[in-house]
Amino acid sequence: MQTRRFLDVDSRGRVSLAKFGYKNTQLLAIQDEDGTITLEEVVPLTRAELEHFTDPAAIEALQRAWTQAATGKARPFTPTGEEPG
């Protein structure tokens, strides 16, 4: 569903997005060549999180876990890798 609202731009170039429910958040603004502005809510990551989420081994482990969970083959997590119990 598309929501349309008139926004007032103040003398400093600011607009309020509270009418759309955006409060206390960070957004990425993307302006197309035709002037269209698209906003996407973003979540900042630390460098360590970015490295983890782009690590091929971590991605493969997560995909394996999703597959196991989807097929009912997930096991309880143990930090040491030992079998529980």
Image (cartoon, rainbow, N blue to C red):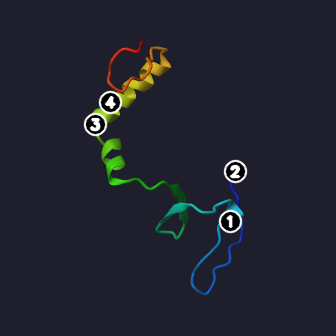
Instruction: Using the image, determine if residue 40 lies above or below residue 15.
Output: above
Q: Amino acid at mark 2?
A: Met
The picture quadrant where one finds residue 13 is: bottom right
Considering every residue shown, the one lying at the far bottom of the view is 11
Q: Which residue is mark 1?
A: 18
**Mark 2 crowd level (few <14, some 14–19, many ≥20, 10 Å Cα):** few
Which quadrant holds the C terminus? Answer: top left
State the separation of the CA atoms marked 3 and 1: 39 Å
Residue matched to label 3: 56
How far apart are labels 3 and 2 at the CA level? 37 Å
Label 3 environment density (alpha carbons within 10 Å; few <14, some 14–19, many ≥20): few
Identify which residue is drawn at 36% across, 47% down: 49
Element on which disc 1 rests? helix
Would you name the residue on which mark 2 appears?
1
> Which residue is rendered at x = 32% and y = 21% of the image?
81
Dot 4 amino acid type = Glu
- Answer whether labels 4 and 2 touch (C-beta < 8 Å): no
Q: Mark 2 and mark 1 in contact? Answer it, CB < 8 Å.
A: no
Label drawn at residue 60: 4
Q: Is residue 5 left or right of residue 35?
A: right
User: Viewed as shown, does residue 62 lie left or right of 51?
Assistant: right
Give whichever of discs 1 and 4 has the lower sequence position.
1
How crowded pointer 1 is (Cα within 10 Å; few <14, some 14-19, many 20+) is rated as few
